[in-house]
Structures are given as C-alpha cells and as structure tokens.
Image: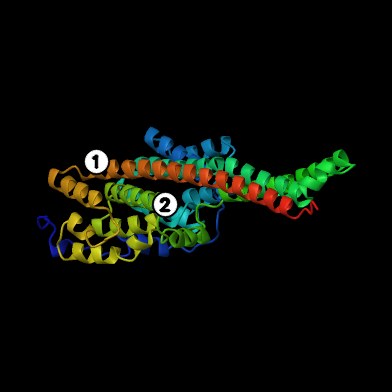
C-alpha cells in the first residue's frame, strides 16, 4: 500500500469545541431515559424525516407526541432544545437518550449540517438490530418445544416406569395425571421463556451488561462467528457515517471501534489512530487491527485510491451483515438438528433404562 496523503500536521489537535467527546462531557447529565430499539428507531426516523422536510424541532416533537411517543421524553427535549437552547446532541446527552456513540455522531453531524442522513442511518441500525433479535427469538421456538417434550413430557412418562404403567390396572388414570403434570410444567417453562424473551427484546439501547456479555461471547471460537461478522459490519457502518458527518478519520476510528464492541478491535484501534497521526493512509492504519478481515483492508485501500471510500465502506457494512445473517441461520440449523437427535437419544436411553429395571423372572 502506498503511503497516504495525510501529513502529521493533519493529526487532530482537538479543542473542547471540536471534540464530540469533550462536548458531551461539558453537558451535565440530569437523568436517564429508557428507550428500546423500536423506540429508538421511531425517534431517529421521525427526526430524519422532519429535518429532511425542513421543519423545526418543535414540529418534530409535536409529530412524536401524535405518535404516542413517551411524553416525559418529549417534555425533556422541549425544555432542553426550546428553553435552554441546547444543541440536539447536548440535549440527548443531558437526558441519556440513545446510546453514547449515537450521541457523539449526532453532535458532530449537527455542526456539519448532515443531521437527516445521520438520523436515517441510526434508525436503520436500531431497526436491523431489533429485527435480528426477533429472528433469534423465533428460531428458538422449535428447540424449546423439543426441550419441553423431551425433558418434561417424556421424563414424566418414563419416570413412572412406562412398562409397568402399560400393564397396571389404572393405566388411564395414571396417564391423565402424568399429562396434567406435564402440561403444568410445560406451561411454567413456556411462561419463563416468554418473560426472558420479552425482557431481552425490550432492553434499553444503552445497556452496559449486554455490551459486556457481547465482548465475552465474541472471544469464543466458532459459536461467535455471527456476532463477529456483525461487529465488522458495525465498524464499517459507523466509520462511513462518522466521516460523512464531518468527523476526522482519527475520531471516526475511535467511534467505529466503540460501536463495534469487538474486543479485538477495541484492543488495537489506538494503534491505528497513532498511524493516522504519523501520516499513514486509513488502509495502512487499519492494518494494525489484526481482527479486521483482509477484504475490509483491501476495499478501504481501493476506496481511498479511487475517491469512493464512502461507497466501499457501505458495501462492506452490507456484505458483513449478510454474512452474519447467513452464519446465524447455519448455526441455528445445526443446533436444531443436534438437539433433535439429542432428544431422541435421551428418550431411547430412558426407555431402555426403564426396561432394564424390570425383573421378568
């Protein structure tokens, strides 16, 4: 790769008025706002449509109110934007709306006059994340049914010794009792699963334990492939959006790394920033992040040379989202088949054990 056109003088020396991190720190946080992925998508898309149409914040907040958006949140934004005169990014930071990376992006986008595009992109990110969560929950329905049948129904039947049950005088009554008990246990299991899925689907967008679990999960080989692919997609998506919003490449790398939540990227992105300071091209800087696939580095290099970096990063983000979806489907298909055969083997083993306990003599 050829040495890039950025000189060392281009390395960012950021003042409090230029650095989105400093800008957000300057705002005193006065509260937190619970916002799920669907709510964040609705919020971002409404702002994107409203700003694209040229209407002001007051009208946009009126539209959100008509959409039955949270009244407390709307009231807080009215106070911050219309009475205190906060920038939108500052208002979001003051009351903890959206996640930190989105707030930084919005703060810079507002200064550069590209808020509609940034909000539209963030809306798509939140929407896709929620769609993946729903797809994951739906894919677990069959495995959970298999677990209920194998570990509850068959366990209860065989636990009562199926052979003795077949030759007992009160077979019908005992079967009815077993089925009632199995039905109650299955209903309790289904209710517990529903509660877990409901809570998981409605986690707030700014939820630190989820990020921590994700980092631990992505260190595991094989099973974490879908998550790692999606992290690369997020890295490319946020890098493209941050540069489009007016951030320096130096800032964009940090924001993209934090948004990806990938431990391999988070551990090495500062090396890439150091290379940017030393005047290297973006492709050469990203080469220090060994977690990034070669395909990403090659496309970034091509994008820089051809002046179509935005297009290449968008392509990479979509490509790795598709890879993540395909990998997820393959994993769930394999896990379902393993569970099917595992349940069959378990049931057969329990039947054989029950028969072996009989004394035919």
Q: Nearer the viewer, residue 136 or 152?
A: 152
Residue, disc 1? 311
Looking at the rendered structure, the secondary structure element under dot 2 is: helix
- Rendered location of residue 151, percent (x, y): 67, 50
Q: Which residue is mark 2?
A: 227
Look at the numbered discs 1 and 2 and tell me whether their residues touch, using CB distance below 8 Å. Answer: no
Q: Find residue 167 and report its image quarter.
A: top right
Q: Secondary structure at mark 1?
A: helix
18, 169: nearer the viewer: 169
When asked about the image quadrant of residue 216, the answer is bottom left
Instruction: Looking at the image, tell me whether mark 1 or mark 2 is earlier in sequence order.
Output: 2
| Residue 317 position in % (x across, y down) | 32, 44
Q: CA distance from mark 1 to mark 2?
A: 23 Å
Q: Residue at 55% x, 40% y: name it.
A: 138
Find the residue positioned furthest to the left: 2
Evaluate whether residue 221 shows in this view: yes
Query: Front-most of 83 and 138?
Result: 138
On the image, the x and y values in percent for residue 186 come to 72, 45
From what the image shows, is residue 207 above or below residue 121? below
Label 1 environment density (alpha carbons within 10 Å; few <14, some 14–19, many ≥20): few
Is residue 180 visible in the rendered image? The answer is no
């Amino acid at each position: 790769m050829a040495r890039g056109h950025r000189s060392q003088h281009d390395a960012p020396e950021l003042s409090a008025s230029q650095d989105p991190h400093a800008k957000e720190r300057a705002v005193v946080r006065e509260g937190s706002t619970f916002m799920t992925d669907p709510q964040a998508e609705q919020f971002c898309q409404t702002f994107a449509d409203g700003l694209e149409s040229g209407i002001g914040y007051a009208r946009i907040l009126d539209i959100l109110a008509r959409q039955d958006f949270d009244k407390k949140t709307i009231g807080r934004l009215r106070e911050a934007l219309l009475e205190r005169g906060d920038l939108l990014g500052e208002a979001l930071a003051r009351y903890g709306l959206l996640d930190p990376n989105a707030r930084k992006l919005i703060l810079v986008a507002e200064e550069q006059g590209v808020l509609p595009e940034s909000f539209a992109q963030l809306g798509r990110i939140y929407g896709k994340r929620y769609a993946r969560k729903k797809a994951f929950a739906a894919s677990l329905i069959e495995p959970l049914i298999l677990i209920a049948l194998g570990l509850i129904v068959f366990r209860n039947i065989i636990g009562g010794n199926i052979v003795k049950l077949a030759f007992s005088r009160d077979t019908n009554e005992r079967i009815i009792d077993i089925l009632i008990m199995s039905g109650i246990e299955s209903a309790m299991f289904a209710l517990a699963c529903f509660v877990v899925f409901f809570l998981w689907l409605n986690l707030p967008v700014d939820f630190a334990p989820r990020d921590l679990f994700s980092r631990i999960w992505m260190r595991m080989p094989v099973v974490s492939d879908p998550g790692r692919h999606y992290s690369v997609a997020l890295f490319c998506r946020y890098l493209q959006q941050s540069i489009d919003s007016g951030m320096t490449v130096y800032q964009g790398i940090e924001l993209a790394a934090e948004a990806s939540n990938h431990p391999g990227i988070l551990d090495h992105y500062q090396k890439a920033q150091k290379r940017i300071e030393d005047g290297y091209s973006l492709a050469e800087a990203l080469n220090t992040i060994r977690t990034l696939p070669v395909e990403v580095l090659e496309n970034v290099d091509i994008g820089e040379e051809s002046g179509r970096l935005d297009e290449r990063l968008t392509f990479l983000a979509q490509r790795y989202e598709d890879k993540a979806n395909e990998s997820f489907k393959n994993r769930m298909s394999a896990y379902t088949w393993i569970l099917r055969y595992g349940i069959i083997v378990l049931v057969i083993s329990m039947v054989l054990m029950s028969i072996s306990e009989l004394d035919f003599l």
